[in-house]
Image (cartoon, grey):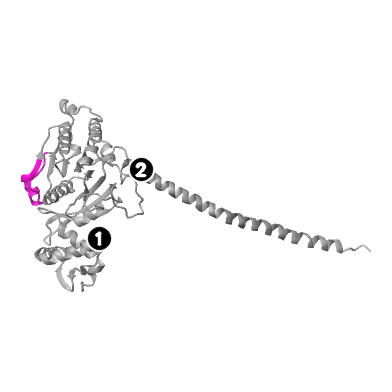
Amino acid sequence: MPAIAIPKKTEKTEPTPKAKTKKEVPDTKKTNTKAKEDPADAKVASIRAKNLDLAIQQIQKDYGEGSIIRMGDDYRVDVDVIPTGNLLIDRALGVGGFPRGRIVEIYGPESSGKTTLTLTAIAQAQKNGGLAAFVDVEHALDPQYAKKLGVNMDNLLVSQPSSGEEALRIVETLVRSNALDVIVLDSVAALVTKQELDGDIGDSTVGAQARLMSAAMRKLTSIIAKARTTCIFTNQIREKIGVMFGNPETTPGGRALKFYSSVRVDIRRIGAIKHTDGTVAGNRTRLKVVKNKVAPPFTEAEFDIMYNEGISAVGSLLDLALEHGILLKRGSWFSYKGEQLGQGRDATKDALKADEKMYEEIERLVKNALSGHGEEEEDSIEF
Protein backbone atom coordinates (compact mmCIF):
# COMPACT_ATOMS: atom_id res chain seq x y z
CA MET A 1 0.00 0.00 0.00
CA PRO A 2 2.16 2.88 -1.33
CA ALA A 3 -0.30 5.81 -1.05
CA ILE A 4 -0.44 7.41 2.41
CA ALA A 5 -2.40 10.71 2.54
CA ILE A 6 -2.79 11.21 6.31
CA PRO A 7 0.59 12.95 7.08
CA LYS A 8 0.12 15.36 4.17
CA LYS A 9 -3.22 16.57 5.56
CA THR A 10 -1.71 17.20 8.98
CA GLU A 11 1.16 19.24 7.44
CA LYS A 12 -1.27 21.50 5.57
CA THR A 13 -3.66 22.07 8.44
CA GLU A 14 -1.04 22.74 11.17
CA PRO A 15 0.87 25.78 9.74
CA THR A 16 -2.22 27.76 8.75
CA PRO A 17 -3.63 28.29 12.27
CA LYS A 18 -0.10 28.92 13.61
CA ALA A 19 0.47 31.58 10.96
CA LYS A 20 -2.83 33.25 11.83
CA THR A 21 -2.04 33.28 15.52
CA LYS A 22 1.42 34.71 14.84
CA LYS A 23 -0.06 37.54 12.75
CA GLU A 24 -2.79 38.34 15.26
CA VAL A 25 -0.48 38.58 18.27
CA PRO A 26 1.77 41.43 17.00
CA ASP A 27 -1.29 43.39 15.83
CA THR A 28 -2.68 43.46 19.36
CA LYS A 29 0.72 44.48 20.70
CA LYS A 30 0.91 47.40 18.24
CA THR A 31 -2.51 48.66 19.19
CA ASN A 32 -1.60 48.39 22.86
CA THR A 33 1.66 50.31 22.36
CA LYS A 34 -0.12 53.04 20.39
CA ALA A 35 -2.67 53.39 23.14
CA LYS A 36 0.14 53.67 25.66
CA GLU A 37 2.07 56.23 23.55
CA ASP A 38 -0.82 58.66 23.09
CA PRO A 39 -0.78 60.11 26.64
CA ALA A 40 2.99 60.49 26.49
CA ASP A 41 2.82 62.35 23.19
CA ALA A 42 0.15 64.65 24.56
CA LYS A 43 2.27 65.29 27.64
CA VAL A 44 5.34 66.10 25.52
CA ALA A 45 3.28 68.43 23.31
CA SER A 46 1.90 70.19 26.38
CA ILE A 47 5.39 70.67 27.82
CA ARG A 48 6.70 72.00 24.50
CA ALA A 49 3.81 74.46 24.20
CA LYS A 50 4.40 75.64 27.77
CA ASN A 51 8.12 76.08 27.14
CA LEU A 52 7.40 77.99 23.93
CA ASP A 53 5.06 80.37 25.76
CA LEU A 54 7.73 80.96 28.40
CA ALA A 55 10.33 81.63 25.70
CA ILE A 56 8.03 84.10 23.92
CA GLN A 57 7.32 85.89 27.21
CA GLN A 58 11.04 86.12 27.96
CA ILE A 59 11.83 87.48 24.48
CA GLN A 60 9.08 90.09 24.73
CA LYS A 61 10.30 91.04 28.21
CA ASP A 62 13.91 91.44 27.07
CA TYR A 63 13.43 92.98 23.62
CA GLY A 64 10.02 94.62 23.67
CA GLU A 65 6.38 93.64 23.31
CA GLY A 66 6.42 93.48 19.52
CA SER A 67 9.77 91.72 19.10
CA ILE A 68 8.12 88.35 18.33
CA ILE A 69 4.53 87.68 17.32
CA ARG A 70 2.49 84.83 15.86
CA MET A 71 1.59 85.61 12.26
CA GLY A 72 -1.76 83.84 12.58
CA ASP A 73 -2.88 85.92 15.55
CA ASP A 74 -4.75 89.18 15.17
CA TYR A 75 -2.07 90.79 17.28
CA ARG A 76 -1.77 94.48 18.07
CA VAL A 77 0.61 96.17 20.48
CA ASP A 78 -1.14 98.74 22.65
CA VAL A 79 0.79 101.86 21.63
CA ASP A 80 -0.02 105.52 21.12
CA VAL A 81 0.06 106.61 17.50
CA ILE A 82 0.20 109.64 15.25
CA PRO A 83 -2.65 109.11 12.74
CA THR A 84 -2.08 109.84 9.08
CA GLY A 85 -5.60 111.17 8.53
CA ASN A 86 -6.28 108.47 5.94
CA LEU A 87 -8.33 105.44 6.99
CA LEU A 88 -6.77 103.10 4.43
CA ILE A 89 -3.19 103.92 5.48
CA ASP A 90 -4.04 103.75 9.19
CA ARG A 91 -5.59 100.31 8.63
CA ALA A 92 -2.52 99.09 6.75
CA LEU A 93 -0.26 100.24 9.59
CA GLY A 94 -2.32 98.05 11.89
CA VAL A 95 -2.50 100.33 14.92
CA GLY A 96 -4.16 103.40 13.44
CA GLY A 97 -1.10 105.42 12.51
CA PHE A 98 2.64 105.77 13.08
CA PRO A 99 3.61 104.47 16.55
CA ARG A 100 5.03 106.86 19.12
CA GLY A 101 8.49 106.22 20.52
CA ARG A 102 9.52 104.30 17.41
CA ILE A 103 11.63 104.80 14.30
CA VAL A 104 9.80 104.68 10.95
CA GLU A 105 11.38 104.42 7.50
CA ILE A 106 9.47 105.45 4.37
CA TYR A 107 11.21 104.66 1.09
CA GLY A 108 10.35 104.51 -2.57
CA PRO A 109 11.13 105.86 -6.05
CA GLU A 110 11.14 109.52 -6.95
CA SER A 111 7.82 111.40 -6.77
CA SER A 112 6.10 108.48 -5.08
CA GLY A 113 4.63 110.45 -2.16
CA LYS A 114 7.21 110.00 0.62
CA THR A 115 7.39 113.65 1.68
CA THR A 116 3.63 114.06 1.18
CA LEU A 117 2.96 111.23 3.62
CA THR A 118 5.29 112.70 6.25
CA LEU A 119 3.76 116.18 5.93
CA THR A 120 0.29 114.65 6.27
CA ALA A 121 1.35 112.99 9.53
CA ILE A 122 2.79 116.32 10.74
CA ALA A 123 -0.51 118.06 9.94
CA GLN A 124 -2.46 115.47 11.95
CA ALA A 125 -0.09 115.80 14.91
CA GLN A 126 -0.53 119.59 14.87
CA LYS A 127 -4.32 119.26 14.72
CA ASN A 128 -4.14 117.23 17.93
CA GLY A 129 -2.06 119.91 19.63
CA GLY A 130 1.36 118.37 19.00
CA LEU A 131 4.65 119.88 17.90
CA ALA A 132 6.70 118.75 14.92
CA ALA A 133 10.09 119.34 13.30
CA PHE A 134 11.23 118.82 9.72
CA VAL A 135 14.96 118.29 9.07
CA ASP A 136 15.22 119.14 5.38
CA VAL A 137 18.48 117.51 4.31
CA GLU A 138 17.43 117.60 0.64
CA HIS A 139 16.71 121.36 0.86
CA ALA A 140 13.51 120.78 -1.11
CA LEU A 141 10.67 121.60 1.29
CA ASP A 142 7.89 123.59 -0.39
CA PRO A 143 6.09 125.71 2.26
CA GLN A 144 3.13 126.45 -0.02
CA TYR A 145 2.52 122.77 -0.72
CA ALA A 146 2.88 121.96 2.98
CA LYS A 147 0.19 124.55 3.80
CA LYS A 148 -2.17 122.91 1.28
CA LEU A 149 -1.67 119.62 3.10
CA GLY A 150 -2.78 121.25 6.35
CA VAL A 151 0.61 121.92 7.94
CA ASN A 152 0.78 124.97 10.20
CA MET A 153 4.09 126.43 9.04
CA ASP A 154 4.14 128.97 11.88
CA ASN A 155 4.48 126.17 14.44
CA LEU A 156 6.69 123.86 12.37
CA LEU A 157 10.39 123.71 13.21
CA VAL A 158 12.48 123.50 10.03
CA SER A 159 16.22 122.88 9.79
CA GLN A 160 18.41 122.63 6.69
CA PRO A 161 21.74 121.23 7.94
CA SER A 162 24.92 121.33 5.91
CA SER A 163 26.22 117.85 6.79
CA GLY A 164 24.98 114.46 7.90
CA GLU A 165 26.60 114.71 11.32
CA GLU A 166 24.92 118.08 11.88
CA ALA A 167 21.53 116.72 10.82
CA LEU A 168 21.66 113.74 13.17
CA ARG A 169 22.93 115.85 16.09
CA ILE A 170 19.98 118.21 15.55
CA VAL A 171 17.61 115.22 15.62
CA GLU A 172 19.25 113.98 18.84
CA THR A 173 18.93 117.39 20.51
CA LEU A 174 15.28 117.70 19.50
CA VAL A 175 14.47 114.23 20.81
CA ARG A 176 16.20 114.90 24.14
CA SER A 177 14.00 117.97 24.62
CA ASN A 178 11.00 115.64 25.15
CA ALA A 179 8.84 118.35 23.59
CA LEU A 180 8.20 117.07 20.07
CA ASP A 181 5.63 114.57 18.84
CA VAL A 182 6.98 114.06 15.30
CA ILE A 183 10.44 114.54 13.80
CA VAL A 184 10.97 113.98 10.07
CA LEU A 185 14.38 113.65 8.42
CA ASP A 186 14.15 113.98 4.63
CA SER A 187 16.17 112.08 3.49
CA VAL A 188 18.79 109.53 4.57
CA ALA A 189 20.17 109.31 1.03
CA ALA A 190 21.01 113.03 1.12
CA LEU A 191 23.11 112.77 4.30
CA VAL A 192 26.68 113.67 3.37
CA THR A 193 29.51 113.13 5.83
CA LYS A 194 32.15 115.75 6.64
CA GLN A 195 34.75 113.39 5.18
CA GLU A 196 32.98 113.57 1.84
CA LEU A 197 32.46 117.34 2.09
CA ASP A 198 36.14 117.95 2.79
CA GLY A 199 37.21 115.83 -0.19
CA ASP A 200 36.74 116.33 -3.88
CA ILE A 201 33.84 115.08 -5.97
CA GLY A 202 34.60 111.51 -6.96
CA ASP A 203 36.78 110.65 -3.94
CA SER A 204 36.11 107.20 -2.53
CA THR A 205 34.26 107.28 0.80
CA VAL A 206 33.14 103.66 1.03
CA GLY A 207 30.91 102.94 4.00
CA ALA A 208 31.09 106.44 5.52
CA GLN A 209 27.33 107.01 5.35
CA ALA A 210 26.58 103.53 6.69
CA ARG A 211 28.93 104.03 9.67
CA LEU A 212 27.31 107.39 10.40
CA MET A 213 23.80 105.90 10.38
CA SER A 214 24.86 102.90 12.47
CA ALA A 215 26.33 105.13 15.18
CA ALA A 216 23.29 107.43 15.12
CA MET A 217 20.78 104.59 15.41
CA ARG A 218 22.55 103.15 18.45
CA LYS A 219 22.24 106.49 20.25
CA LEU A 220 18.78 107.52 19.05
CA THR A 221 16.77 104.35 19.61
CA SER A 222 16.62 104.46 23.40
CA ILE A 223 16.04 108.21 23.75
CA ILE A 224 13.32 108.14 21.08
CA ALA A 225 11.50 105.44 23.06
CA LYS A 226 11.79 107.41 26.32
CA ALA A 227 10.64 110.67 24.70
CA ARG A 228 7.75 108.88 22.92
CA THR A 229 8.59 110.79 19.75
CA THR A 230 7.72 109.42 16.32
CA CYS A 231 10.91 109.74 14.27
CA ILE A 232 10.34 109.30 10.52
CA PHE A 233 13.23 108.85 8.10
CA THR A 234 12.54 109.02 4.38
CA ASN A 235 14.88 107.21 2.02
CA GLN A 236 15.47 106.72 -1.68
CA ILE A 237 16.22 103.49 -3.55
CA ARG A 238 19.29 102.33 -5.43
CA GLU A 239 20.02 99.26 -7.54
CA LYS A 240 22.64 96.66 -6.79
CA ILE A 241 25.11 96.03 -9.59
CA GLY A 242 25.22 92.57 -11.16
CA VAL A 243 22.07 91.14 -9.56
CA MET A 244 20.58 88.67 -12.04
CA PHE A 245 17.94 87.07 -9.82
CA GLY A 246 15.79 88.56 -7.10
CA ASN A 247 15.10 92.17 -6.29
CA PRO A 248 18.06 94.40 -7.20
CA GLU A 249 16.72 97.37 -5.21
CA THR A 250 18.26 98.52 -1.95
CA THR A 251 18.24 101.65 0.21
CA PRO A 252 21.27 103.88 0.93
CA GLY A 253 22.74 104.31 4.40
CA GLY A 254 23.60 100.72 5.21
CA ARG A 255 21.52 98.19 7.10
CA ALA A 256 21.31 99.90 10.49
CA LEU A 257 18.10 101.81 9.74
CA LYS A 258 16.44 98.61 8.50
CA PHE A 259 17.16 96.87 11.80
CA TYR A 260 16.28 99.73 14.13
CA SER A 261 13.03 100.70 12.37
CA SER A 262 9.84 99.42 13.96
CA VAL A 263 7.89 100.17 10.77
CA ARG A 264 9.20 100.20 7.20
CA VAL A 265 6.92 101.45 4.44
CA ASP A 266 7.40 101.00 0.69
CA ILE A 267 5.41 103.59 -1.26
CA ARG A 268 5.15 103.64 -5.07
CA ARG A 269 3.18 105.32 -7.83
CA ILE A 270 1.17 102.74 -9.79
CA GLY A 271 -0.83 104.91 -12.19
CA ALA A 272 -2.08 108.33 -13.18
CA ILE A 273 -5.47 109.80 -12.29
CA LYS A 274 -6.89 111.76 -15.22
CA HIS A 275 -9.80 114.11 -15.71
CA THR A 276 -12.35 113.49 -18.44
CA ASP A 277 -10.41 115.83 -20.74
CA GLY A 278 -7.27 113.71 -20.34
CA THR A 279 -5.27 116.01 -18.07
CA VAL A 280 -3.47 114.34 -15.18
CA ALA A 281 -4.96 115.27 -11.80
CA GLY A 282 -2.94 113.02 -9.51
CA ASN A 283 -1.38 109.63 -8.91
CA ARG A 284 -2.77 106.30 -7.80
CA THR A 285 -0.37 105.11 -5.12
CA ARG A 286 0.28 101.78 -3.43
CA LEU A 287 1.73 101.56 0.08
CA LYS A 288 3.14 98.32 1.46
CA VAL A 289 4.23 97.78 5.06
CA VAL A 290 7.29 95.54 4.64
CA LYS A 291 8.21 95.52 8.33
CA ASN A 292 6.05 96.05 11.39
CA LYS A 293 6.90 95.36 15.02
CA VAL A 294 3.58 96.57 16.40
CA ALA A 295 1.17 94.72 14.07
CA PRO A 296 1.26 92.00 11.40
CA PRO A 297 3.37 93.16 8.43
CA PHE A 298 2.95 92.83 4.64
CA THR A 299 -0.31 94.77 4.54
CA GLU A 300 -1.10 97.07 1.62
CA ALA A 301 -3.19 100.13 0.86
CA GLU A 302 -4.03 101.88 -2.41
CA PHE A 303 -5.05 105.53 -2.36
CA ASP A 304 -5.12 108.73 -4.40
CA ILE A 305 -2.57 111.53 -4.19
CA MET A 306 -4.11 114.54 -5.90
CA TYR A 307 -2.06 117.48 -7.10
CA ASN A 308 -2.47 120.60 -4.94
CA GLU A 309 -4.47 118.52 -2.44
CA GLY A 310 -2.28 115.68 -1.21
CA ILE A 311 -3.55 112.30 -0.05
CA SER A 312 -7.27 112.16 -0.81
CA ALA A 313 -9.23 111.27 2.31
CA VAL A 314 -12.47 111.31 0.28
CA GLY A 315 -11.11 108.78 -2.21
CA SER A 316 -10.04 106.40 0.56
CA LEU A 317 -13.41 106.77 2.28
CA LEU A 318 -15.12 105.95 -1.03
CA ASP A 319 -13.01 102.80 -1.46
CA LEU A 320 -13.70 101.61 2.09
CA ALA A 321 -17.42 102.33 1.81
CA LEU A 322 -17.58 100.19 -1.33
CA GLU A 323 -15.54 97.45 0.34
CA HIS A 324 -17.94 97.23 3.30
CA GLY A 325 -21.12 97.57 1.25
CA ILE A 326 -22.05 100.99 2.59
CA LEU A 327 -22.02 102.38 -0.94
CA LEU A 328 -23.15 100.45 -3.98
CA LYS A 329 -21.78 100.62 -7.49
CA ARG A 330 -23.80 99.59 -10.54
CA GLY A 331 -21.93 100.15 -13.74
CA SER A 332 -20.35 103.56 -13.39
CA TRP A 333 -22.99 104.89 -10.96
CA PHE A 334 -22.46 105.11 -7.19
CA SER A 335 -25.42 105.11 -4.81
CA TYR A 336 -26.06 105.47 -1.09
CA LYS A 337 -29.34 104.40 0.54
CA GLY A 338 -30.89 104.03 -2.89
CA GLU A 339 -29.93 107.55 -3.93
CA GLN A 340 -27.51 108.00 -6.80
CA LEU A 341 -24.49 110.11 -5.88
CA GLY A 342 -22.77 110.45 -9.22
CA GLN A 343 -21.52 108.79 -12.36
CA GLY A 344 -17.87 107.95 -12.10
CA ARG A 345 -15.39 108.16 -9.26
CA ASP A 346 -14.59 111.87 -9.63
CA ALA A 347 -18.24 112.94 -9.63
CA THR A 348 -18.96 110.82 -6.56
CA LYS A 349 -15.99 112.31 -4.70
CA ASP A 350 -17.27 115.80 -5.53
CA ALA A 351 -20.73 114.85 -4.25
CA LEU A 352 -19.29 113.62 -0.94
CA LYS A 353 -17.25 116.81 -0.56
CA ALA A 354 -20.33 118.95 -1.20
CA ASP A 355 -22.54 117.18 1.37
CA GLU A 356 -20.72 117.41 4.70
CA LYS A 357 -23.50 115.71 6.66
CA MET A 358 -23.55 112.66 4.37
CA TYR A 359 -19.74 112.53 4.41
CA GLU A 360 -19.68 112.41 8.21
CA GLU A 361 -22.40 109.75 8.28
CA ILE A 362 -20.56 107.50 5.81
CA GLU A 363 -17.30 108.07 7.67
CA ARG A 364 -18.93 107.01 10.94
CA LEU A 365 -20.32 103.85 9.34
CA VAL A 366 -16.93 103.00 7.82
CA LYS A 367 -15.16 103.47 11.17
CA ASN A 368 -17.74 101.25 12.86
CA ALA A 369 -17.19 98.59 10.19
CA LEU A 370 -13.40 98.79 10.61
CA SER A 371 -13.68 98.47 14.38
CA GLY A 372 -16.02 95.49 14.10
CA HIS A 373 -19.14 97.28 15.35
CA GLY A 374 -20.81 97.74 12.01
CA GLU A 375 -23.63 95.25 12.67
CA GLU A 376 -25.41 97.68 14.97
CA GLU A 377 -25.54 100.27 12.21
CA GLU A 378 -26.54 97.96 9.36
CA ASP A 379 -30.23 97.94 10.29
CA SER A 380 -30.48 101.67 9.63
CA ILE A 381 -29.03 101.40 6.14
CA GLU A 382 -31.44 100.89 3.26
CA PHE A 383 -30.24 100.42 -0.28
Identify the amino acid type marked 1. Answer: Ser
User: Residue 150 lies in magenta, yes or no?
Assistant: yes
Q: Which residue is mark 1?
A: 371
Identify the amino acid type marked 2. Answer: Ile
Image vertical order of residue 74 relative to residue 111, above or below: below
Q: Residue furthest right?
A: 1
Question: Do the residues under discs 1 and 2 have CB atoms within 8 angstroms?
Answer: no
User: Viewer-proximal residue, 349 or 178?
Assistant: 178
Image vertical order of residue 257 relative to residue 354, above or below: above
For mark 1, give the secondary structure.
helix
Q: Which residues are magenta?
A: 139-157
Q: Position of residue 373 (x, y in %)?
A: 25, 64
At 11% from the left edge and 37% from the top edge, which residue is drawn? 160
Q: Quadrant of residue 364?
A: bottom left
Q: Quadrant of residue 358?
A: bottom left
User: Residue 225 lies in magenta, yes or no?
Assistant: no
Q: Is residue 348 visible?
A: no
Task: Determine whether, in the image, residue 138 is placed left or right of residue 18.
Answer: left
- Mark 1 to mark 2: distance in Å? 30 Å
Q: Quadrant of residue 378?
A: bottom left
For mark 2, give the secondary structure.
helix
Q: Position of residue 164 (x, y in %)?
A: 17, 33
Image vertical order of residue 353 relative to residue 130, above or below: below
User: Viewer-proximal residue, 77 or 246?
Assistant: 77
Q: Which residue is mark 2?
A: 59
Front tag of 1 and 2: 2
